[in-house]
Amino acid sequence: MYVSQFINDYHYQDNNVFVKIMNMTQDEEKKTSNRFIHKLKSEPLVTLGLILTASALLGATYGYQRGDSATMQKFMRYRIAAQGFTVLAAMSIPISYQVQSFLDKKKEEK
């Protein structure tokens, strides 16, 4: 009984989100796309990491399709490095905001 209620609530919530997305006005869509573009521009290292990861996965897929396990393994290693870079870049964002906030407070005190 509890599980079925949870499942019904979960589907109800998902449907509400889906309906909200489908009923977006053009202004809301522009705001959403502008936010996405702003994030891509404001965090270029994360964007670069995402592109590198996707490229490595495409290279590994190419190696897999050709049956070349050496190429596939090479690109999978590149993928791990790219994902590590992306995680480090994403983790550095809050740290950089904290450092910038600290420096701004120091300037205000002087």
Image (cartoon, helix red, strand yellow):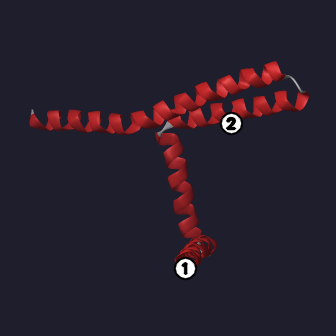
Residue 51: percent from the left, percent from the top?
Answer: 64, 35
Quarter of the rendering occupied by the C terminus: top left
- For mark 1, what is the residue? 5
- For mark 2, what is the residue? 54
Horizontally, residue 71 falls left or right of residue 87, namely right
Residue 74: percent from the left, percent from the top?
Answer: 73, 20
Residue 100: percent from the left, percent from the top?
Answer: 28, 35
Q: Residue at x 70, y 29 (%)?
A: 56
Identify residue type, mark 2. Ala
Task: Give the vertical position of 10 relative to 83 (above or below).
Answer: below
Q: Residue furthest front?
A: 1
Q: CA distance from mark 1 to mark 2?
A: 39 Å
Identify residue type, mark 1. Gln
- Which is nearer the N-term, disc 1 or disc 2? 1
Name the foreground residue: 47 vs 70: 70
Secondary element type, mark 1: helix
Task: Give the vertical position of 35 relative to 80 (above or below).
Answer: below
Few, some or many residues within 10 Å of mark 2 (<14, 14–19, 20+): some
Q: Residue at x 68, y 36 (%)?
A: 54
Residues under numbered marks 1 and 2 in contact, where contact means CB atoms less than 8 Å apart: no
